[in-house]
Amino acid sequence: MAAPSILFTRMRETSPLVQCITNYVAMNVAANVLLAAGASPAMVHAEEEAGEFAAIAGALTVNIGTLSPTWVAGMKTAIAGARAAGKPWVLDPVAHFATTFRSQTVAALLDLRPAIIRGNASEIIALGGGQSAGQGVDSGDPVSDAEDAARQLAFSTGAVVAVTGAVDFVTDGERSVRISGGSSLMPKVTALGCSLTALVGAFVAVAPKQPFEATMAALATFAAAGEIAERGAQGPGSFAIRFLDSLHGFRSESLEADGRIVAV
Ligand SMILES: Nc1ncnc2c1ncn2[C@@H]1O[C@H](COP(=O)(O)OP(=O)(O)OP(=O)(O)O)[C@@H](O)[C@H]1O
Ligand SMILES: Cc1ncsc1CCO
Ligand SMILES: [Mg+2]
């Protein structure tokens, strides 16, 4: 099993090209997060080019945050391109339970076999058919309530499933870990979850046969960088700036802090 620090170093040294189809809120945030971490983001979503681009990118990430029919067409074309080229793709089902358009879109995207699904607890509970307390893009549920749904979703889809929150949970249906760290200021900064999904893409681009390890490494990177950023932050604004700086100056050794990743 590749250690998170080894994957981080590989990601930074190779600077993988990651195609991110993400929402209008997250596009700038996620691109800056990937650059600070050492990856190379490209926000490419038009149907006319998304499939062609997916073949040259190391991985594709698809986030439904600000959905429209033309974006759905671009997503499907990009996924087809990624699959044809043997590249992994990551799904972020933002608030998929909120409207019929979103839930139908996510059902169609799930049929296209994402390698990894990353969502907050409310999103993962609802994907498993459960009743979540989420209202919109923010979670209303603790991660612990989503762990069974995550395992079932991993079984039924074959994807690695990541649930994020105060303590993150990652499962491939058989192996599961909890990852602790981060900051309570993280959910007060918009699009950090969307940006994490993009970073998962960067890690799986350098470890396409190890989606479980790649997901763990990306989440552990956010957990460690979030802790560093919180020191001295006065609120969400200064935290957001410190978080980018802390990703930029990040040293992979801090990923192996005692107790950060615990198998369950
Ligand atoms: N209370 C918390 N304490 C520590 N870290 C947290 C907390 N809540 C969220 N995080 C971290 O914030 C990051 C984003 O996760 P979150 O679950 O907030 O995503 P999200 O709801 O999809 O976000 P968004 O939709 O705004 O992009 C993850 O790294 C997660 O571990
Ligand atoms: C606020 C918001 N609205 C749609 S997507 C998004 C970014 C966080 O998911
Ligand atoms: Mg989200």
Image: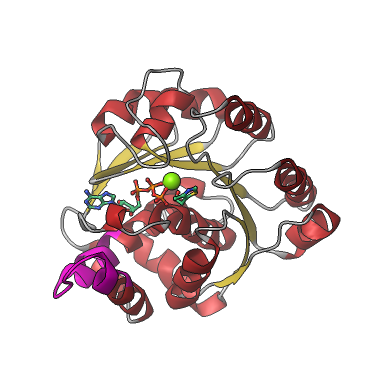
Q: In this view, does 1 lie above or below 252?
A: above
Q: Return the x and y of residue 137 as percentages of the image width and height.
A: 42, 41
Q: Is residue 255 visible?
A: no
Residue 184, picture quadrant: bottom left
Which one is nearer the viewer's eye here, 196 or 209? 196
Query: Measured from the top left, where is residue 114 in percent x and y?
Result: 61, 40
Q: Does 52 appear above or below 95?
A: below
Question: Is residue 80 or residue 205 the one in the foreground?
Answer: 80
Q: In the rendered structure, which segment of residues is drawn in magenta?
A: 223-240
Residue 61 shown left or right of residue 13 in the figure? right
Instruction: From the viewer's perspective, tell me whether residue 175 is left or right of residue 27.
Output: left
Name the magenta segment's main secondary structure. Answer: helix
Asked whether residue 226 is in view, the answer is yes
The residue that appears at 25% across and 70% down in the rendered structure is 239
Measured as percent of width and height from the top left, residue 92 is found at 52, 44
In the depicted structure, whether residue 160 falls above or below residue 97: below
Q: Is residue 50 left or right of residue 43?
A: right
Residue 238 part of the magenta segment = yes
What residue lies at 32% left-to-right and 57% top-to-bottom? 220
| Residue at 38% from the left image edge and 79% from the top image edge | 248
